[in-house]
């Protein structure tokens, strides 16, 4: 073989290796471009098949530094916001709960959700069609992604970029969450209305002797409000002691004089009877004998001052 032919062979080999190097650099972007430019389902599926042929990673969970610049398929859930300025840079977890920093090429995200860790809205384009997901839908979905490893970082989250190829919304979980939030909003509205109604009441003594009792100066809705409101009525040891010592049971009257014999009270609203009730225990040793009993009473009187109120009267009937 002469020198001229050898030179040609070297040039061909050099070109061949150059093409391999270029092929290893360009494919991710060409593959993504085909997915991004797909205008219908047929083009989308064709692009996915082409992408699949270039995939080098079967399981990204087992990746090490050798995965850099390689293509993969995976599924993500729990997409979260980041402190990054880039709109499309997000944090996401795979179904195996490994976290990645991802640049989504075919979606835009809007911050400002009720939960600061999530997005308010997401707009994604798949197969030439736009889909808009709200915060609840995003938090109850699985996102299938065609991706490319940008780098592996053992000290923080691996960085990847990719195209969302499909979305599976968990409609059952979404429906439950939506109903739960509707109920929460309904209760918040009722609470707000009762707050306003309570504020309009004149300051002073509030009395309730049972449903539709002629001597009531408040109705059962206000009683339920005071009975159920967080930080509401507190049954003091003084009231418990007074209640027990006003009774006829001599042993418990004597035990009640010492506060340590009286246990914590449980206050609750009885919707069926439309009553605010309390139950508390008293136990101890008197005259050489052990005593224990739970006492039940109705909350009947309060003192109101602006937004505040305190319990001042309980009764056995």
Image (cartoon, helix red, strand yellow):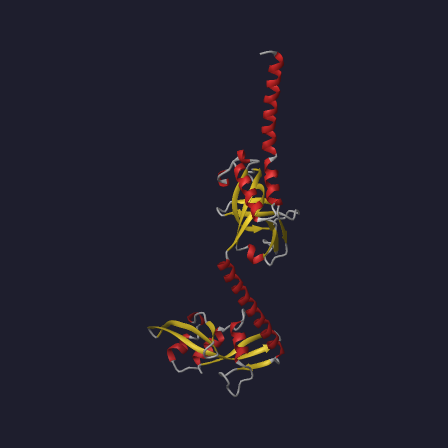
Residue at the top extreme, as displayed: 2
Q: Is residue 289 left or right of residue 121?
A: left
| Residue at point 41%, 72% (across, down) | 281
Give whichever of 307, 166 is nearer the camera.
166
Give how far across and how far down residue 61 sits, in percent. Answer: 49, 41
Give how far across and how far down residue 179 sits, in percent. Answer: 52, 65
Give how far across and how far down residue 257 sits, in percent. Answer: 44, 75
Rendered position, 259 above or below 32: below
Question: Which corner quadrant holds the C terminus?
Answer: bottom left
Give whichever of 280, 134 is nearer the camera.
134
| Residue at point 59%, 36% (across, down) | 27
| Snapshot quadrant of residue 67 | top right
| Residue at point 38%, 80% (across, down) | 250
Residue at the left extreme, as displayed: 288
Residue 236 seen in the current view: yes
Rendered position, 299 above or below 80: below
Residue at the front extreme, as displayed: 42
Give how far across and how far down residue 33 sits, in percent. Answer: 62, 41
Q: Is residue 266 left or right of residue 148?
A: left
Question: Which corner quadrant holds the N terminus?
Answer: top right
| Snapshot quadrant of residue 146 | top right
Rendered position, 108 above or below 11: below
Give whichever of 213, 169 is nearer the camera.
169
Residue 157 seen in the current view: no
């Amino acid at each position: 073989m002469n020198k001229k032919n050898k030179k040609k062979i070297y040039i061909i080999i050099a070109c061949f290796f150059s093409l391999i190097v270029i092929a290893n650099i360009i494919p991710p972007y060409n593959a993504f471009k085909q997915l991004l430019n797909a205008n219908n389902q047929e083009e989308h599926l064709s692009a996915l098949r082409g992408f699949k042929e270039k995939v080098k990673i079967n399981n990204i969970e087992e990746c090490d530094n050798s995965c850099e610049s390689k293509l993969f398929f995976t599924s993500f859930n729990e997409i979260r916001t980041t402190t990054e300025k880039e709109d499309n840079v997000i944090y996401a977890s795979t179904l195996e709960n490994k976290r990645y920093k991802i640049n989504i090429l075919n979606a835009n995200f809007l911050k400002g959700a009720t939960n600061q860790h999530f997005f308010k809205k997401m707009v994604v384009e798949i197969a030439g069609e736009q889909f808009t997901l709200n915060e609840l839908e995003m938090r109850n979905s699985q996102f299938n992604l065609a991706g490319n490893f940008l780098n592996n970082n053992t000290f923080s989250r691996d960085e990847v970029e990719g195209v969302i190829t499909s979305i599976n919304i968990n409609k059952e979980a979404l429906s439950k969450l939506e109903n739960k939030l509707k109920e929460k909003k309904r209760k918040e509205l009722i609470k707000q209305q009762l707050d306003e109604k309570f504020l309009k009441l004149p300051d002073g003594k509030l009395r309730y002797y049972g449903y539709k009792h002629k001597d009531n100066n408040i109705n059962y809705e206000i009683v339920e409000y005071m009975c159920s409101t967080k930080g509401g009525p507190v049954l003091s040891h003084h009231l418990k002691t007074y209640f027990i010592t006003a009774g006829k049971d001599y042993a418990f009257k004597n035990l009640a004089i010492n506060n340590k014999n009286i246990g914590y009270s449980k206050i609750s609203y009885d919707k069926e009877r439309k009553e605010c009730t309390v139950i508390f225990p008293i136990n101890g040793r008197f005259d050489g004998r052990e005593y224990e009993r739970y006492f039940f009473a109705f909350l009947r009187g309060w003192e109101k001052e602006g937004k505040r109120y305190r319990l001042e009267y309980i009764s056995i009937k």
